[in-house]
Amino acid sequence: GDLPCGAAVRGEMPPPPKSNQQHPPNCRVFIGNLATEKTTPQELATIFQKYGRLAEQPLLRRSFGFVQFETPESAQAAIRGAQGQQIGGLCIDLTLSDNRPVK
């Protein structure tokens, strides 16, 4: 592997189209056992943004939620770092989510 690491190509690629559904794989974290009635998206953003940049506002549904990171590394760091953390009195259960659009 003596090829330079894409140094010559930098700057010529058009940026990827920005759309809500097109996130890279393995960047979305599923938050299970979430006390959504005692939690706000802002609160989740504060907890999770220390692990990496969030691509969008956290999503809350009944008893669970999602956090979308910009990189898979951030998602992994969040799962390692915040697993079992108490939010709203419940210990959250974090797993990597697939990229299906959330209903």
Image: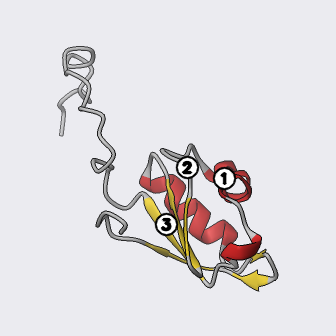
Vertical comparison of 70 with 35: above or below: above
Front-most of residues 69 and 9: 69
Instruction: Report the side of 97 relative to 50 (left or right).
Output: left
Front-most of residues 69 and 40: 40
Which residue is the site of mark 3?
29
Q: Nearer the viewer, mark 1 or mark 3?
A: 1
Instruction: State the scheme by which the image is colored.
Output: secondary structure
Disc 3 element: strand
Marks 1 and 3, how far apart at CA: 12 Å
Could you tell which of marks 2 and 3 lies nearer the N-terminus? 3
Residue 57 is marked as 2
In percent of the image, x 44 and y 48: which residue is there? 71
Residue 15 picture quarter: top left
Q: Return the x and y of residue 25 as percentages of the image width and height.
A: 31, 58
In percent of the image, x 55 and y 49: which residue is there? 57
Amino acid on which disc 3 is placed:
Val
Amino acid on which disc 2 is placed:
Gln
Could you tell which of marks 1 and 3 lies nearer the N-terminus? 3
Q: Return the x and y of residue 78 as percentages of the image width and height.
A: 60, 62
Amino acid on which disc 1 is placed:
Ala
Instruction: Report the side of 50 relative to 31 (left or right).
Output: right
Quarter occupied by the N terminus: top left
Marks 2 and 3, how far apart at CA: 12 Å
- The residue at the far right in this view is 89
Marks 1 and 2, how far apart at CA: 7 Å
Could you classify mark 2 by the number of other residues whose Cα lies within 10 Å: few (under 14), some (14-19), or many (20 or more)? Answer: some
Q: Are marks 1 and 2 in contact (CB under 8 Å)?
A: yes
Disc 1 element: helix
